[in-house]
Image (cartoon, helix red, strand yellow):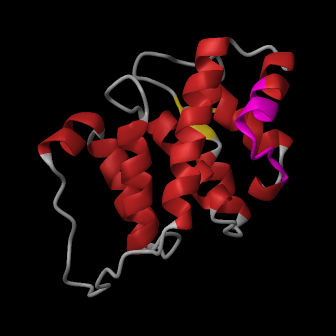
Amino acid sequence: MIDILVYLFETYGYADACPAEPEQLARKLSAAGFEEEEISDAIEWLEGLREISGQPAPVINSDSRAFRIFSDEELACLDASCRGFLAFLESSGVLNAGQREVIIERAMALPGGEVSLSQFKIIVLMVLWQQQVNLDMLVLDELLTEEVEDGDDLPDGSEAVTVH
């Protein structure tokens, strides 16, 4: 399903350009070679993103002394690297508290349980894409870079693989 989200981002530069009708989007994804089950999961996930993005943003105090407590379910789904990356994005001003909550909600909606950092980056990218946030090229590059798991050494010794 993550491959479909990356495909949509790369194919449709703006969320508004992506077909809103699930049947039309399913036909386009099927024509692009994606499997029916993955397409169904992706469309369901995207509909949830559109729904939550269409709701009024919750009022969240942005006091610098405040911090977010993760539930046990969230801790099981988002490992320390995902939570740390989220905190980094928020502290650097890329995300606000409302966007953070949408990202966490969409990560929890991803089928399959635990979310890897590379999957989490795509979720962040898709939430910001849906909200039509203009991203700095360095941030965009970071979101489109997949982390290599420990033990997966690349021939040139680098530590990241570009997704796009």
The foreground one among 150 and 38 is 38
In the image, 27: left or right of 45? right
**Taking 82 as reference, is 14 above or below it?**
below
Quadrant containing the C terminus in the rendered view: top right
Residue 96: quarter of image: bottom left
The foreground one among 9 and 34 is 34
In the image, 135: left or right of 32? left
Residue 116: quarter of image: top left
Question: In the image, what residue occupies the spot 39% across and 57% down?
Answer: 86
**Taking 58 as reference, is 132 above or below it?**
above
Which x, y percent locates residue 31?
A: 86, 18
67 inside magenta stretch: no
In the image, 57: left or right of 1? left
**Taking 81 as reference, is 14 above or below it?**
below
23 inside magenta stretch: yes
Q: Which residues are magenta?
A: 17-26
Which x, y percent locates residue 90?
A: 42, 69
Which x, y percent locates residue 52?
A: 48, 58
Residue 164 in view here: no
Which x, y percent locates residue 152?
A: 49, 16
Quadrant containing the N terminus in the rendered view: top right
